[in-house]
């Protein structure tokens, strides 16, 4: 029986008609192993995803909090990916539409300028309308603008599509800032901002690496790849509940439930510390009903807050330097260290990892100091890291060996990125909740102008002041450390104004007393 087809592994019903040889048995065994191995690998991958999802949910404090943080991070990530894709697709755009480098620069600069101006009306909307609905609608328009960009036949239509895209993406800054303020308590906003800004960094990396490679095959496909997630993201944003304004709709951490309703307060930890220490508010920063302020009056109020001016200027200078690195960093690395494009991209990838680490660490450090009673904790973290950034970039830019320079570069970028989360959280502490959207719009306007001008000024100084080439870029980066140092000085100065402005924001956040209220 065994010799005529009853061998182990052969189907009994056909064994008497087609005897199995040893080779046939091995083939059938291998055919059975392949799908089993694939199914085992798929099951293992699914298990890893589920485990990672559970750990992420536990770390972020619950399912709803995780959904909100991930969605907001994806919003900024989508914006960052789109901005990086244009630069990564420059070669293909030039050949496909028969345009020049000047046209590419015009695309980036004009889009940034339109986005900067458009933040102001979106700041008003962020303070007055349902934010989740507005943000979801805007993201739908993002997707449409990206598809429009993919379908154009000439530069003029591409410029129009990018102008429209710049106008609608301007909504992200004010709306996200306002939502973060109302969804998360003041004691953890720095850490939450760290998670959300990590999404922006990852999105920029995706745009540079992934869609840039796709653009090598088709720049139209690169824009389509970005458009499709926009529609899914819009659906997710529509599904988020609108938080109550004034910091009263905070999502409780699973391990730290909110207090009872009668004990609930909209004060941030910084404002509570200012009140307990008896810090006086500035009477000029405690107006009447903030809801009645128009955009001009709101902008004047925002720019009367001394700490806010210092933080805006410091942030703009930091982003200015960062924009220069993003534009000329790869070229500088190739010429300074004598490496090829692949190694330059790898170096930028490593720097990106350092930026992510700094973003997460900066937000956590500022919150930790605040919880321990250091009112200036967030601004202190930003001031220290800004100073360290300036110092670390000196050897990073002057060293000629890649191996020697990498540790300095990683540390410098880590410190540079660590400033943003605590500063974003600090701005919410010094501004009344009803002005969060408009305050962020003013800040985004100044920051966007700095980012738009950086590539032009870096390139012009390198070519016309220092003669171009490797030496020109090296001396340009060294010269541009002066604005970075000025950023640190401004933050050190903000340490003296921040406590008083926190107290003023707390006083301005109190609802106006009705005229008919009893006084005795």
Image (tube, rainbow, N blue to C red):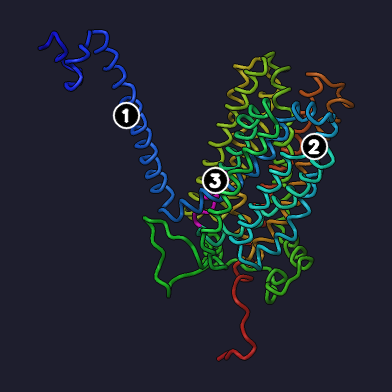
Q: Quadrant of residue 100?
A: top right
Q: Disc 2 marks which residue? A: 153
Q: Disc 3 marks which residue? A: 194
Q: Which residues are magenta?
A: 187-197
**Residue found at x 70% / y 27%:** 329
Front in this rendered view, residue 227 or 515: 227
Q: Are marks 2 and 3 in contact (CB under 8 Å)?
A: no
Mark earlier in primary sequence (2, 3):
2
Taking 514 as reference, is 27 left or right? left
Q: Nearer the viewer, mark 2 or mark 3?
A: 2
At which x and y percent is residue 436?
Answer: 64, 61
In space, the residues marked 1 and 2 are separated at their CA atoms by: 47 Å
Total marks drawn?
A: 3
Q: Disc 1 marks which residue? A: 40
**Residue found at x 64% / y 68%:** 281
Q: Quadrant of the C terminus?
A: bottom right
């Amino acid at each position: 029986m065994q010799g005529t087809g009853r061998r182990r592994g052969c189907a009994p019903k056909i064994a008497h008609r087609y005897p199995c040889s040893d080779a046939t048995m091995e083939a059938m065994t291998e055919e059975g192993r392949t799908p089993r191995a694939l199914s085992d690998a798929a099951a293992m991958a699914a298990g890893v995803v589920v485990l990672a999802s559970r750990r992420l949910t536990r770390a972020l404090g619950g399912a709803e909090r995780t959904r909100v943080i991930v969605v907001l991070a994806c919003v900024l990530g989508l914006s960052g990916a789109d901005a990086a894709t244009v630069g990564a697709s420059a070669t293909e755009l030039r050949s496909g539409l028969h345009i020049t480098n000047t046209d590419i620069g015009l695309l980036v600069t004009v889009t940034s300028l339109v986005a900067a101006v458009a933040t102001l009306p979106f700041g008003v909307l962020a303070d007055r309308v349902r934010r989740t609905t507005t943000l979801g609608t805007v993201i739908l328009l993002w997707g449409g603008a990206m598809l429009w960009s993919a379908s154009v036949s000439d530069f003029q239509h591409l410029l129009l599509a990018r102008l429209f895209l710049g106008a609608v993406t301007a909504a992200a800054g004010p709306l996200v800032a306002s939502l973060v303020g109302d969804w998360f308590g003041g004691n953890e906003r720095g850490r939450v901002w760290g998670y959300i800004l990590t999404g922006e960094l990852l999105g920029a990396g995706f745009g540079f690496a992934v869609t840039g490679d796709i653009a090598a095959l088709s720049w139209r496909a690169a824009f389509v790849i970005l458009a499709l997630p926009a529609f899914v993201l819009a659906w997710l944003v529509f599904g988020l509940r609108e938080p109550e304004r004034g910091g009263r709709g905070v999502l409780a951490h699973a391990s730290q439930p909110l207090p009872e309703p009668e004990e609930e307060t909209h004060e941030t930890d910084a404002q509570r510390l200012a009140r307990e220490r008896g810090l006086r508010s500035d009477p000029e920063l405690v107006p009447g009903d903030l809801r009645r302020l128009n955009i001009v009056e709101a902008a004047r109020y925002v720019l009367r807050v001394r700490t806010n001016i210092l933080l805006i200027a410091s942030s703009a200078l930091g982003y200015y330097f960062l924009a220069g690195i993003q534009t000329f960093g790869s070229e500088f690395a190739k010429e300074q260290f004598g490496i090829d494009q692949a190694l330059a991209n790898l170096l930028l990838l490593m720097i990106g990892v350092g930026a992510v680490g700094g973003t997460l660490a900066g937000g956590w450090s500022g919150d930790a100091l605040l919880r321990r009673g250091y009112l200036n904790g967030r601004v202190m973290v930003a001031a220290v890291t800004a100073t360290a950034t300036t110092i670390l970039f000196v050897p990073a830019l002057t060293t000629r060996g890649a191996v020697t320079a990498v540790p300095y570069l990683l540390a410098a970028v880590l410190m540079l990125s660590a400033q943003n989360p605590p500063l974003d959280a600090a701005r919410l502490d010094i501004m009344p909740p009803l002005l969060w959207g408009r305050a962020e719009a003013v800040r985004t306007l100044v920051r966007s102008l700095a980012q738009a001008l950086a590539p032009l000024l870096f390139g012009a100084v390198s070519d016309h002041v220092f003669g171009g080439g490797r030496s020109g870029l090296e001396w340009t980066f060294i010269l541009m450390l002066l604005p970075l140092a000025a950023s640190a000085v401004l933050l050190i100065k903000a340490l003296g104004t921040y406590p008083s402005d926190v107290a003023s924001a707390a006083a301005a956040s109190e609802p106006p007393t009705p005229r008919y209220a009893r006084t005795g």
